[in-house]
Amino acid sequence: MRTAISTLAVRGATTVRQALEILHDEERTPIAGATDLFVALNFGTLTMRRFVDIWNVDELRRIAVDGDTLVIGALATYTDLIRSPMIAARLPMLAEASRLVGGPQIQNRGTIGGNIANASPAGDSLPILSAVDAVVVLRSVTGERRVAFRDFYTGYRESVRRRDELIVAVEIPPVPGRQWFRKVGTRAAQAISKVVIAGVRDGQSLRLALGSVAPTVVRARRAEAALAEGRSIDEAVDALRADITPIDDVRSTADYRHLVSANLVRRFLTETR
Ligand SMILES: Cc1cc2nc3c(=O)[nH]c(=O)nc-3n(C[C@H](O)[C@H](O)[C@H](O)COP(=O)(O)OP(=O)(O)OC[C@H]3O[C@@H](n4cnc5c(N)ncnc54)[C@H](O)[C@@H]3O)c2cc1C
């Protein structure tokens, strides 16, 4: 089913306060860059017709360092992330991932907040946020709460975000160690991930997360533990098998995803040894 944009009721906001008041008073869905949302409307998978457009809420675009925490505003686009010297210095794998998202049009409109809120297991920024133990900052008219990224998703395309809350930012504590990101899709560009992986290695300490291999992004806790216990790369790769639960779908098969995940983890552990 196709949806004519003219049938939609959109209210615009230019401040966070205004957007939150609208979300509090009326049942509306936020629109940021609309790159996921228009696809869902076009496919008829989104029935909501009332929206609040937050694209012009400039205060949500800020990328800053506060104390030792990197704070990325929810409306930071992939282009913002690619161009930011702070991202280059503190979280280069996020700039690298952003360069691989869609094409320039999507990079100019797609936001990190939209990627998080959309809650697709294939979202490319999500394994990075998981591997660096990010914190999602949610705000409503009644206040603000910070949710550890590991507790944010509750199931396939589900999260703890309430309908009246906006994601306003994501906070990244310092990331000691080597960062590593790989995305495997059908093509080198403009492809949804079949497997996406992000890792941070600091000696024997390993933080590793994968997307497109389970209903939500997953931390590879068993593989992490194997390495922390001093076991071999082969044993860590074996342990990974129990960390992920890939399925067969239109983009790939469970077997292929297991194989590629294992190969990527092996490569990560070898390259960062
Ligand atoms: C051609 C194409 C290629 C793509 N390629 C990739 C890719 O390579 N990798 C990838 O990960 N994604 C890709 N995407 C998906 C999409 O671009 C990203 O997920 C993007 O980050 C979504 O951000 P947005 O601002 O456009 O979100 P929107 O479409 O505006 O919103 C998505 C969802 O998030 C909610 N939302 C948005 N912002 C907030 C907020 N601040 N607080 C609460 N809820 C919010 C909306 O209500 C909606 O439910 C692609 C999409 C297209 C159309």
Image: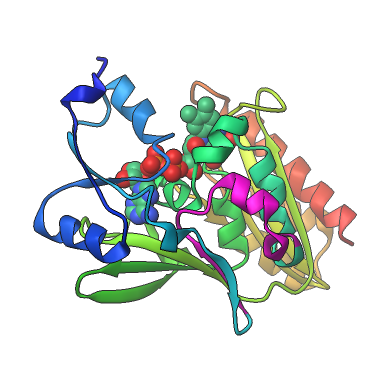
The residue shown at (69%, 41%) is 99
Decide: is 5 above or below 157: above
The residue shown at (88%, 54%) is 270
Counting from the top left corner in percent of width and height, residue 60 is at: 43, 61
Q: Is residue 124 magenta?
A: no
Counting from the top left corner in percent of width and height, residue 258 is at: 64, 38
**Apparent side of residue 267 relative to residue 17 in the rendered image (left or right):** right
Counting from the top left corner in percent of width and height, residue 121 is at: 48, 43
The reply to whether residue 155 is in sight is no
Q: Nearer the viewer, residue 149 or 26?
A: 26
Q: What's drawn in magenta, residue-wise?
A: 69-88
**Apparent side of residue 44 relative to residue 202 in the rendered image (left or right):** left
The reply to whether residue 200 is in sight is yes
Ligand 1, by image quadrant, is: top left
Q: Which of the 4 image quadrants contains residue 63?
A: bottom right
Counting from the top left corner in percent of width and height, residue 159 is at: 34, 55
